[in-house]
Image: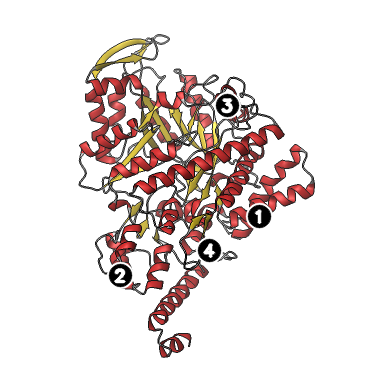
């Protein structure tokens, strides 16, 4: 009867918090038991739900045959064993395995989903990102489709540029017929790949890209106007510097037939730009890739041209290239002291960065490649993508509002540190193991480096499910809401209600937590107008809906400044936003030297991954934020 003692001793507020926490923990324990998983790490219910649906090994009947700890042991063992190839002793390999394991079970770092799923298994495909080239012939188009099916079956997402395909109604000289155009083949890809379940755990994901100077660009911009069409594809327009200049100068620009390299016609750049903006306002697509900027910043531009990215847009890749990603949980790199303000533990962050680079480089050698062309390119450039998650959580602990100059400066400072230490780690590995084969003539060679193991080191990925497992905020995004529903019924079998664990902790500690308050927060998403809470709490626990788009773009640009590849970031808009608001964000992203931009206006699609809903409509067994 702890609560009785607390009440009698004059600690009623603490007693109330104790009762609430105990009741919630009892509810979570019962829900966990229903999952049929041994929780040997004290994880949240949502984390266990994701692990069961996507990561833990299963037998032939779909039964779970490993625990969360065993999953991390499997991954750590597989990654560390690569060091045997480089002459390390059994003792050194075992020590490295321990470092990899500790880093993951402490949620300081997690690799991309295919590595967690497949390391140490028969499938063995560990990379998330692939780009496959499409040539302008029947053999080229359908040959790539076959390679895409193999790649996606193994767990990888694929990006394609359809820009080399001749436009609709162009001539086909070999048959005397009329060309179908890139949109026809995009639809064929979508239909063919729709049934593939990646690694038997997630569905096909693609990126479709078309250059802004392709004659069929207007059809491409409009191709997803009807919701549900091209469902496996995200789409982005590859925008050139020449086009952007024509937009700013209000001039016409050339559309070029890729078959003949001749000008097919001219369009008003601003009219095309306005159509891109309008469609993005309507349903969030297309996104924009500043393709010339991607190529100018590509460290291996001497051997390849970048035409497309992976499905989320953060990883520009050349033909047949791939990349494996991993993310540092910035929240875990803080030094938290009772009664004192949190501070960054830079030495700990340095150690995580160096161990993470070592881990990701080992993934390249441990990988079981789905096609030989991808293996050849991966080992020629050895791209890795070390990024971050938990950025919003870190800001909250530091007492910094997301929409502030201090947040922008913090973003740049942290990513600069991660990038510089990542370079140092890759350079050290280059001395020990040799530089990537395409090093000669690369950006690093031209900058005077003598060794570099990896052509790219840093990428900021979206961390949609890995952040759920780690129990932290997603990537560099602000909090979507204090409490919300994640619509993952189709992929995990149940929707997940998530509540920010830091807010719960503060609310219980400060004595204003109640079920009524949490239901209200779930409906509204924001605490911005809830004046019963202290002002400093409302300012720090800022959510996506409280932030004007300019801050989203500025945070993205701050991270991009010190990222080799690109940055996955959604610039969120309220439902009442106008196309002009979208345009301002696009222009700001261009001015601040982002490599791309994706926007989303709340409620612009019927199916929305993150939602605020009344509590009674949520799955009563799905609770978030409480670790047991």
Q: Earlier in the sequence, mark 4 or mark 3?
A: 4
Q: Mark 1 near mark 2, Cβ–Cβ under 8 Å?
A: no
> 301 or 155, which lies in front?
301
In the displayed structure, does residue 270 sit left or right of residue 257? Answer: left
Task: Residue 525 in the image: state x and y as whole percent.
Answer: 30, 59
Q: Which residue is mark 3?
A: 444
Q: Earlier in the sequence, mark 3 or mark 2?
A: 3
Q: Is residue 338 above or below residue 332?
A: below
Q: Is residue 294 above or below residue 397?
A: above
Label 2, residues with CA under 10 Å away: few <14, some 14-19, many ≥20: some
Q: Is residue 95 above or below residue 303?
A: below
Q: Which residue is mark 4?
A: 43
Task: State the SS at label 2.
Answer: helix
Q: CA distance from mark 4 to mark 2?
A: 25 Å
Residue 517 is tagged as: 2
Picture quadrant where residue 259 is located: top left
In the displayed structure, does residue 586 sit left or right of residue 88? Answer: left
Task: State the SS at label 1.
Answer: helix
Q: CA distance from mark 1 to mark 3?
A: 35 Å
Task: State the SS at label 4.
Answer: loop
Picture quadrant where residue 191 is located: top left
Q: Mark 3 near mark 2, Cβ–Cβ under 8 Å?
A: no
Q: Mark 4 near mark 2, Cβ–Cβ under 8 Å?
A: no
Q: How is the image coloured?
A: secondary structure
Closest to the camera, between mark 3 and mark 2, is: 3
Q: Which residue is mark 1?
A: 73
The count of marks equals: 4
In the displayed structure, does residue 96 sit left or right of residue 107? Answer: right
């Amino acid at each position: 009867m702890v609560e009785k003692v607390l009440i009698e001793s004059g600690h009623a507020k603490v007693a109330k918090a104790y009762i609430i926490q105990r009741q919630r923990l009892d509810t979570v324990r019962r829900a966990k038991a229903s999952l049929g998983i041994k929780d040997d790490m004290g994880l949240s219910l949502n984390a266990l739900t994701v692990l069961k649906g996507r990561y833990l090994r299963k037998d032939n009947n779909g039964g779970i045959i490993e625990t969360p700890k065993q999953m991390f042991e499997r991954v750590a063992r597989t990654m560390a064993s690569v060091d045997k190839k480089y002459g390390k002793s059994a003792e050194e390999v075992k020590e490295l395995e321990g470092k990899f394991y500790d880093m993951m079970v402490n949620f300081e770092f997690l690799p991309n989903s295919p590595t967690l799923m497949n390391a140490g298994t028969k499938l063995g495909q560990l990379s998330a990102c692939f780009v496959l080239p499409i040539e302008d012939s029947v053999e080229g188009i359908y040959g790539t489709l076959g390679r895409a099916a193999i790649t996606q079956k193994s767990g990888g997402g694929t990006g394609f540029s359809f820009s080399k395909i001749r436009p609709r109604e162009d001539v086909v000289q070999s048959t005397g017929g009329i060309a179908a155009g890139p949109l026809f083949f995009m639809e064929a890809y979508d239909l063919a790949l729709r049934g593939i379940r990646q690694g038997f755990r997630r569905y096909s994901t693609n990126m479709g890209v078309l250059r802004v100077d392709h004659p069929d660009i207007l059809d491409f911009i409009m191709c997803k106007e009807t919701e549900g069409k091209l469902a496996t594809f995200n789409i982005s327009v590859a925008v050139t510097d020449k086009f952007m200049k024509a937009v700013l100068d209000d001039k016409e620009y050339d559309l070029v037939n890729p078959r003949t390299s001749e000008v097919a016609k001219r369009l008003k750049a601003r009219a095309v730009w306005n159509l891109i903006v309008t469609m993005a306002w309507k349903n969030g697509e297309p996104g924009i890739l500043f393709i010339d900027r991607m190529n100018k910043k590509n460290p291996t531009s001497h051997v390849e041209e970048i035409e497309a990215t992976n499905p989320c847009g953060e990883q520009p890749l050349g033909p047949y290239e791939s990349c494996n990603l991993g993310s540092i949980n910035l929240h875990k790199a803080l030094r938290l002291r009772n009664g004192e303000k949190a501070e960054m533990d830079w030495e700990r962050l340095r150690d995580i960065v160096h161990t993470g680079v070592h881990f990701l480089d080992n993934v390249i050698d441990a990988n079981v490649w789905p096609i030989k062309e991808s293996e050849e390119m991966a080992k020629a450039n050895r791209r890795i993508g070390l990024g971050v998650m938990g950025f919003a959580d870190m800001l909250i602990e530091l007492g910094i509002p997301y929409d502030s100059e201090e947040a922008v400066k913090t973003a740049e400072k942290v990513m600069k540190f991660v990038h510089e230490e990542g370079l140092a780690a890759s350079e050290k590995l280059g001395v020990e193991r040799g530089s990537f084969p395409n090093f000669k003539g690369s950006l690093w060679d031209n900058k005077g480096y003598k060794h570099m193991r990896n052509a790219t080191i840093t990428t900021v990925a979206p961390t949609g499910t890995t952040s759920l497992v780690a129990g932290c905020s997603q990537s560099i995004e602000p909090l979507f809401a204090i409490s919300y529903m994640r619509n993952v019924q189709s992929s995990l079998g149940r929707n997940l209600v998530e509540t920010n664990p830091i807010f719960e902790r503060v609310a219980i500690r400060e004595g204003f937590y109640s079920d009524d308050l949490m239901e209200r927060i779930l409906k509204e998403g924001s605490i911005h107008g809830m004046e019963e809470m202290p002002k400093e709490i409302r300012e720090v626990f800022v959510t996506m809906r409280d932030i004007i788009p300019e801050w989203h773009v500025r945070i993205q640009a701050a991270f991009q400044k010190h990222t080799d590849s690109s940055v996955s970031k959604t610039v969120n808009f309220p439902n009442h936003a106008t196309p002009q608001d979208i345009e301002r964000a696009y222009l700001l992203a261009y001015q601040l030297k982002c490599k791309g931009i994706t926007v989303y206006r709340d409620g612009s699609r019927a199916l929305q991954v993150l939602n605020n809903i009344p509590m009674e409509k949520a799955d009563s067994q799905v609770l978030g934020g409480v670790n047991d």
